[in-house]
Amino acid sequence: MDPVTQGAFGAIFAQTFSNKKKILFGSIVGCFAGLAPDLDIFIRSASDPLLKLEYHRQFTHSLIFIPIGALIVTLFSRIIFKKYLSWGETYLFSFLGFATHGLLDACTSYGTQLLWPFTDERISWNYISVVDPFLTIPVILAIIFVIIMKNKYITLFGIVYILAYLTFGAYQENRAQFVGKSIANLRGHDIKDLTAKPSLGNLFLWKTIYEDDGFYYVDAARLFTKSEYCQGTKIKKFDLNNDFLELDVNSQQYKDIKRFDWFSQGYLGKVIEKKIITDVRYSAVPNEVDGLWGIKINLDKNNSSHVDWVVNRSNYMEKWKRFFDLILGKNCKSLIN
C-alpha cells in the first residue's frame, strides 16, 4: 500500500489507546510505526535487479516480526517523545502501528509474506488497490478531527469505515470473480487459475485473469449497480520448460526467471519478439496485457549475468484515456449478476 495510507492506518489504530492529552504523540508514533516496515525498499543491488522484489514485503512485513519491529520503532521514538510518553505507551503505539502494515498490504494484490519464515508464500487477498483515495482520505480526515477535537468517537468511526471499505472490497472481488467466470463460459473455456484484482484507485473497475490452453485471458469487470464486462485480450503463458531453450539451466538468468515467476505468483506472459517476460497481473488499463514491468532475457550474456529489469512507462496519457473510458462504460456489456 502507498506510504500515506500506511502512515494513516498506523496513526488511527494508535489513537484507539491514546488518552486525550497524548493523542497527538500517539498518532505520530503510530504513523512512524506504520511506515517503518517499508524501509526494506533500501535492500537492493545495482547488479541484481530482482533482489528488491525478494526482500520487499518479506521479513519486515511478517506477523512474527511485529514485536521486534515495534521494539525498534520504540527505541527511536523514545529519543523524541521520552518527555511525553512512557516506555509502555510508546511500545503500545508502535506495536499497533507496525501491526497494521503487513495486514493492510495483504489486502492488496501485490503479495506479502505474512507467514515468513515458515513459508515464502506471497499472500494477496485482492480486496483493495495499492493506491485508493476513497480509503485513504476519509481516514486522514478522521485522524485530523480527532487530534483537533479530542473526540475518540471519531477514531471509532474511522476504524468502522476501514472495516466497511475492506468488506466492500471483498464483496466486489466476489462479483469480479463471477464476471470472470461468466466471460470464460461465454467463450467456452475451461478456467484455470482465475483471479480478479481492483484497478488503480477504486473498487469499481477490476481486472480479471484466467488461463486456458496455454494463454492468459485478460478482461475488465465494471461493477456499479450492475455487473458489466469489457472484453480484453490474451497473451501466451510463459513456459519455463519450452521457452528460451537456448538458455543454460545453470545460468543466472534461468534462476532469475524462476525468482520472477515466484514474485508474480505464476502469472507470467511472454513477448517473444522482444525477449521480455511480463507480469500479467499489472497493466495501466485493466483489460490489456501491456505489463507495467517485466524482465528481459539476453542470450548473449554470460552465465553469471542477471536479467534486465524493464519498466513500461510508454503512452501514459493514451492509457489513462482508455482507463477512464472503461470507468464510463464505453465498450462494456452487461451481465446478469
Image: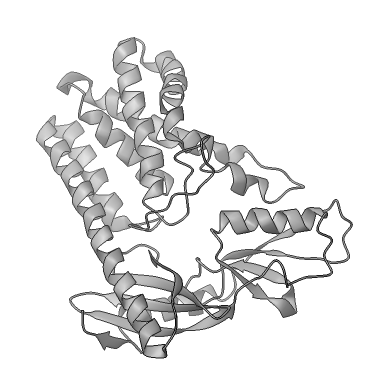
At a point 22% along the width and 25% down the height, the residue shown is 23
Q: In the displayed structure, does residue 232 sit left or right of residue 83?
A: right
Residue 206 quadrant: bottom left
Q: Position of residue 227 (x, y in %)?
A: 25, 79
State the quadrant of the C terminus. Answer: bottom left
**Image colouring:** one colour
Is 42 or 281 nearer to us in this picture? 281
When the figure is inspected, residue 277 is found, relative to residue 140, above or below; the finding is: below
Camera-side residue of 26 and 303? 303
Residue farthest toward the front in the current orientation of the protein: 190
Position in image of residue 239 (x %, y %): 66, 70
Q: Is residue 256 visible?
A: yes
In this view, the residue in front, 244 or 35, is 244
In the rendered image, the vertical position of residue 93 relative to residue 158, given as above or below: above
Q: Residue at x 40, y 82 (%)?
A: 184
44 lies left or right of 327: right
Residue 125 rendering spot, x and y as whole percentages:
37, 54
- The residue lying at 33 percent from left, 57 percent from top is 127
- Disc tally is 0
Q: Quadrant of residue 221?
A: bottom left
Location of residue 163 in the rendering, given as x and y in whole percent from the top left corner: 21, 48
Q: Kindly tell me whether residue 31 is visible in this rendering.
A: no
